[in-house]
Image (spheres, coloured by chain):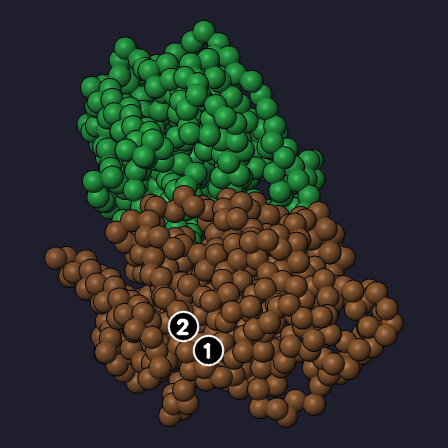
Chain colours: A brown, B green
Amino acid sequence: MASLRLSGWSCLLLACMLGSVVRSAPTYETLYFDQKIDHFGFYEDSTFRQRYLVSDTHWRKPGGPILFYTGNEGDITLFSNNTGFMWDVAEELGAMLVFAEHRYYGESMPYGNLSYTDPKYLNYLTSEQALADFAVLIRFLKGSVESKDSPVIAIGGSYGGMLAAWLRIKYPHAVVGAIAASAPIWQFEDLVPCNLYYQTVTNDFEKSGTGCAESITKSWAAINRMFKTDEGIGWLSREFHLCSPLKCQDDAAAFKNWLSETWVNLAMVDYPYPANFLEPLPAWPIKEVCKHLRNPNLDDKKLLQNIFQAINVYYNYTGITPCLNTSQTAVGSLDDLGWSYQACTEMVMPFCSDGVTDMFEPQAWNFEAFSDDCYKQWGIRPRPEWITSMYGGKNITTASNIIFSNGDLDPWSAGGVKQSLSDSLIAIIITDGAHHLDLRSNNANDPKSVIEARAMEVAYMKKWIKEHSQQVNGI
Amino acid sequence: MASLRLSGWSCLLLACMLGSVVRSAPTYETLYFDQKIDHFGFYEDSTFRQRYLVSDTHWRKPGGPILFYTGNEGDITLFSNNTGFMWDVAEELGAMLVFAEHRYYGESMPYGNLSYTDPKYLNYLTSEQALADFAVLIRFLKGSVESKDSPVIAIGGSYGGMLAAWLRIKYPHAVVGAIAASAPIWQFEDLVPCNLYYQTVTNDFEKSGTGCAESITKSWAAINRMFKTDEGIGWLSREFHLCSPLKCQDDAAAFKNWLSETWVNLAMVDYPYPANFLEPLPAWPIKEVCKHLRNPNLDDKKLLQNIFQAINVYYNYTGITPCLNTSQTAVGSLDDLGWSYQACTEMVMPFCSDGVTDMFEPQAWNFEAFSDDCYKQWGIRPRPEWITSMYGGKNITTASNIIFSNGDLDPWSAGGVKQSLSDSLIAIIITDGAHHLDLRSNNANDPKSVIEARAMEVAYMKKWIKEHSQQVNGI
């Protein structure tokens, strides 16, 4: 779990990576905008090229809306390829689509290849700088006669959803509204109980098959017992088809971490239809997983053999994976290094488990240990209170025009806004929805809940667009 | 005027410096709070001691309001001593008073004596860092049982008024409202005509005496003619009682600058009662000045002798000043160096004059020359669009609970919000009011307009306090 605390968030990206139904390749232009490396100081006056993608096929000129994806921790093409919702609604709204890459990800590297080599180069990787990039880019985009009256709507999922919400909160002059999908803006300090995240995962497994969560609960002690002998360690390595065999007791924590992250990932991507992620996954993958975990009352080896069958659904659904790699739970091309830095600076998200209300090994949130790990890895110390001081924590009711959508299956819903805060800060709960399901393309197997969520999102966007138009025209 | 462009703002502080009616010394505690030098990056992790003053004599515990002065470009004791309004209303509101010093001024030096020695040390002198200081300090102040439900109201004048408004705009979770007195938040880019500032000064002189503005208008050509000969230059030095004689034609610009700034300063401090600033000034000082400028149709020497008599009202009302110093138009203890840096980075305020609609020599706004001057002085380049991108320019109607007060005599009203933008973004115009007259102590000679303005400000503060209390109590 220790490493989960550091790298867990990279999982947030997973859902975005899931292949959506293959569409006719959407056409967009790849453009670059010169951004100041440091918006908040004048000593570093250099610029870098921020990449952004523009599709104006359906844009109704002049004045048609701009849907602006607030890029998160990864290559922006991943988000443009996996946010089918925006492509699906562009024609109806007469909207231009813009996908703006987050600095320090993809091609948008402030110091090129040096960007990640030194804490001094990483200094400008913050949400505040990213939001300033977005605000400045939006100002530029609105600089033409055709776009000057275009309302801009921020859209994002996961960390991108947090940025969309924060962009509306902090730069309401730049965007008329925001759709913040699966955005855990409250997963900070003590705003939500730190064990809610793992409880949500546990709920998913509990309702996906009898004995399922209980099997996982019991697996940790079984693993611990196996790790007590060399024979047990060797057995685990073989039974789990590990590419790199476990060597000693010290490997136990990493091994259990890897399993924990796998269960968490499954909860995020528990989609109602087959979806691709590294390996293809079946519809409702947790149900498939739980088919192997019906009996929690087995001896250690039998129980753990079932656990292997279960995770094999995630890692080897096609049956062609030669071995499992415990150093990887997410797509290899993801830039989770960047997120690890962000988690070690601003994005300090407390997680904990108790093994009673959840199926994980008990682990308290230990900020000091976390901070020490961060210092070891990055040479900097996290500031756990900063995000709340900056963005307001739960006190955000002066903001307006934000939709917070959360799927009830999604662990990240734990830190999300799940009740409307006003008549323009709207919470939508998507029953049977995993991580920002609503941002994915329409699918024949979509549950009614997500169809309704998307319809509501479109209705609110139309409302914001109309209100903006009335304001522009002085009505 | 060139130097005015660089240092003009320091004048903003003048009014604050004006001695208010002497009160029994208010009691306050001087405290210090450890602030991160860089809120927006993690590489510079050091802290500095921010000074703040607290007076809780009248504080109604628990939950009584906190009036929070957002310190501007100077020693915070100057503001606590010269914002009589806050002291006057503390008892009625049961309020704690807090005066927070702005970083890089007074005692709040991020790098001690080195703070101003190098652009790299000055890098953290920005309005964004200052606002973050205020937000973090407010969070700390609200950390006790007695204060946790205390509504905080930001109050500031001039640049401090801009900060008060921006604090509410950017950190509405920190303050329930703001009183932004004489805050020229629109003196940027082309949000207001660049010549409005000098037009306002001109209006003041026009209505304060026949021939007054016209005499000043004509003085520039007379001065230019005097500068054509050594005899004329010598004559000017003697007649104006200059401490350092003018030497050559190159001194003409600086000399005219000095006069221009004097006229501007007079407009700012055109108060209805005698007030102290360096030297005491009479009530309605421009009327006194204009008594010497009734006849614009004189020969050069006679006209300029009158100009001398006029500025002598400002520099030598007591008659004991031995000579006039053209390198100084404001109190010597002011930290206008800091403002000069801020003007050269974020606070790029375009000013211009045309000599037709105003009484000044024509001068266009020349950003390139300004930028070059800044580079010469500070080694950095200004970013004229940043403030608008950051704070929204004229598009701030999503904000709420801000009072923008402006005196119609005050040149800085040119960049202020002079019409209400919504039912909670309230503009108050104070007829016959100079620079943030409303923040000064009650005075027997206060015009009705400022008495009404203060009453309105108190009424709005009570409204915000009541609404906050209802929210806290779930009503």
> Residue at coordinates 86% horizontally, 68% vertically from top-left?
A229
Q: What subunit carries mark 2? A: A
Q: CA distance from mark 2 to mark 1?
A: 13 Å
Q: Does the rendering let one see residue B354? A: no
Tell me whether the residue at label 2 lies in contact with that at label 1, contact meaning CB atoms closer than 8 angstroms.
no
Q: Earlier in the sequence, mark 2 or mark 1?
A: 1
Q: Does the rendering let one see residue A183? A: yes
Q: Furthest-right residue in view?
A: A230
Instruction: Please name whichever residue, B300 or B25, is drawn nearer the observer in this view of the structure.
Output: B25
**Residue B219 x, y percent position in the rendering:** 33, 36
Crowd class of label 1 (few under 14; some 14 to 19; many from 20; radius 10 Å): many
Q: In this rendering, is residue B390 above or below A152?
A: above
Q: What subunit carries mark 1? A: A
- Give SS at disc 1: loop
A229 sits to left or right of B227: right
Label 2 or label 1, whichever lies nearer to me, is 1
Label 2: which residue?
A437
Amino acid of disc 2: Leu
Assign the N terminus of chain A to one quadrant of the image.
Answer: bottom right
A32 sits to left or right of A172: right
Q: In this rendering, is residue B202 above or below A454?
A: above
The part of the image, by quadrant, that contains residue B420 is top left
**Residue B177 x, y percent position in the rendering:** 34, 35
Label 1: which residue?
A284
Instruction: Please name whichever residue, A459 or B96, is drawn nearer the observer in this view of the structure.
Output: A459
